Amino acid sequence: MGVAAGDLAAVVEIAAELRSVANLDQRRKMALQRGCGLLGAEVGAYNLVDRATPTAAMIVSPQNVPDASSALRSVLFDHPLIEHYMTTHDTNPRRLSDVSVGQSVRDLRRTRVYTELLRLVGMRQLAVPVDLIAPVGGDACTFHRSGSDFATRDVGRSIALQIALVATLGGRALAEELSNRPDGNPRWVPARPAEGRVLTQRQWEVLFLLGRGVTVRQVAEHFLMSPHTVTTHRRNAYTRLGVTNSRQAAQWVSEVTARSRTPIEDRVAMVLSR
């Protein structure tokens, strides 16, 4: 499904508006408001999921909707959409009805997913991934209605919306916040692409973070290692790549990342250049 020109124009405008908000939590709340308006949703939620811990949290808009974080945690291993994204590596927007084929509304009302979560935010659900690290966790916006399901046209708009969300809330946005926040979360580091397998996964992560302005001390804190270990990973990575300084290493990571970009990341790059 392609992105309509009108939807893309709207998304460029939304992305510009979101980028003007410095605080990431405020940016998330604004994204939910704009997403609800674009998709005709009654409730928007920013979901942070990590099944390895396991932990989960939700930022919900509008504010009069009950906090559903504990409800999300209670269905972390039962929700069809979470299971779909954690096991398929899919990154496309999906409706709950897309991944629960054959399950009627009556059947769904009998599940824990409904009794614990959906009754609070809305039976009909459309998920828009922002950052996914399958199979254990990821961030996604979900939009909810209590009446009719989201139409095909809404799914098309959500694909356009995803461009703005990834551009302003995904890895690039988190990298900007992380470089100024010592307790930041490094979950957004992308998986090592095939071309990057000359390095170990940890070497890749270290170079990726350092190349985006995160300090050695911050990297050490994130991965629960000493600064000396971080510099050892960096030195070993330099040796494997045949580079001698941080500028060369950052350029290599940037080039490898660019060559391995997905179509959604190409569209994100276009929005960021506007």
Image (spheres, helix red, strand yellow):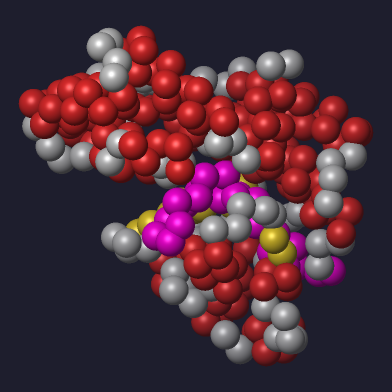
Q: Nearer the viewer, residue 12 or 67?
A: 12
**Percent of width and height locating residue 114:** 59, 77
Q: Which residue lies at the image location 40% right of the left edge and 36% below the top edge?
A: 196
Is residue 182 something one can see in this rendering? no
Q: Quadrant of residue 80?
A: bottom right
Q: Is residue 149 above or below residue 173?
A: below
Q: Which residue lies at the image location 33% right of the left edge and 37% below the top edge?
A: 198
Q: Is residue 193 left or right of residue 11?
A: left
**Percent of width and height locating residue 121:** 63, 63
- Marks counted in the figure total 0
Q: Which residue lies at the image location 84% right of the left edge and 41% below the top edge?
A: 3
Q: Nearer the viewer, residue 12 or 41?
A: 12
Q: Is residue 224 left or right of residue 111?
A: left
Q: Main secondary structure of the magenta part?
A: strand
Q: Quadrant of residue 32?
A: top right
Q: Which residue lies at the image location 72% right of the left edge and 80% below the top edge?
A: 101
**Percent of width and height locating residue 64:** 60, 52
Q: Is residue 224 left or right of residue 207?
A: left
Is residue 121 something one can see in this rendering? yes
**Percent of width and height locating residue 274:** 73, 16
Q: Nearer the viewer, residue 99 or 182?
A: 99
Q: Is residue 104 above or below residue 64?
A: below
Q: Quadrant of residue 197?
A: top left
Magenta-colored stretch includes residue 124: yes
Magenta-colored stretch includes residue 125: yes
Q: Which stretch did the figure color magenta? A: 123-148
